[in-house]
Image: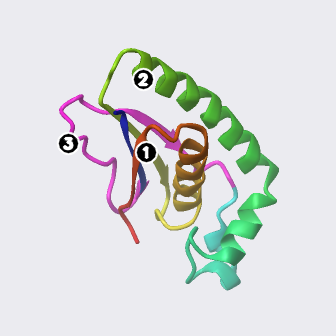
Amino acid sequence: MLKIRIFSFSYLYSGLPEDTSGNGGGFVFDCRFIYNPGRKPEFGNLTGNDLPVRDFLDNQEEMQIFLNNIYKIIDTAVENYISRNFSDLMVSFGCTGGQHRSVYSANKLNEHINQKYPGTETELIHYNL
């Protein structure tokens, strides 16, 4: 069974997550080009797990284009890894503080994989929450 570990992290505070699978890394996606909801006072103490932040990012066109492109890349990798009987895949999303955009993106990819590939196992890890 393919295990997919999905991380969110902060470029500023924690840096890239370590790959403990022994494969030497995985996909890393930078969310910093998308408008940071943390710059709005009403979202400052919230995270990508909170409904107001999720609603805000759901309505950001750049975020939706970004995620659709990520889904295409990761779907191709998942299908390839399954066909080759690989056991591990690592995907990481980084943003400045690791609380809004990267958390949201990691959550969305986790939902996507769980819906599309029920035969896989996902682990969601938010480094900076």
To which residue does mark 2 refer?
82
Along the line of sight, which residue is nearer the eye, 17 or 3?
3
Query: Which quadrant does the C terminus fall into?
Result: bottom left
Do the numbered discs 2 and 1 sit on residues whose CB atoms are within 8 Å?
A: no
Q: Is residue 55 above or below residue 9?
A: below
Is disc 2 placed on a helix, strand or loop? helix
Q: Is residue 66 magenta?
A: no
Q: Secondary structure at mark 1?
A: strand
Q: How far from the left and from the top, in percent, is residue 78?
A: 48, 28
Give the magenta range. Answer: 9-34
Badge nearest the viewer, 3 or 2: 2
Kind of residue at disc 3: Thr
**Nearest to viewer (mark 2 / mark 1):** 2
Q: CA distance from mark 1 to mark 3?
A: 13 Å
* Location of mark 1 (residue): 92
The image position of residue 112, as x and y in percent, is 60, 45
Residue at (64% x, 48% y) in the render? 33
Q: Upstream in the sequence, badge 2 or badge 1?
A: 2
Checking the image for residue 20, the label placed there is 3
Classify 119 as above or below 10: above
The one of 35 and 120 positioned closer to us in this rendering: 120
Pick whichever of labels 3 and 2 is earlier in the sequence: 3
Task: Give 50 or 82, whichever is nearer the viewer.
Answer: 82
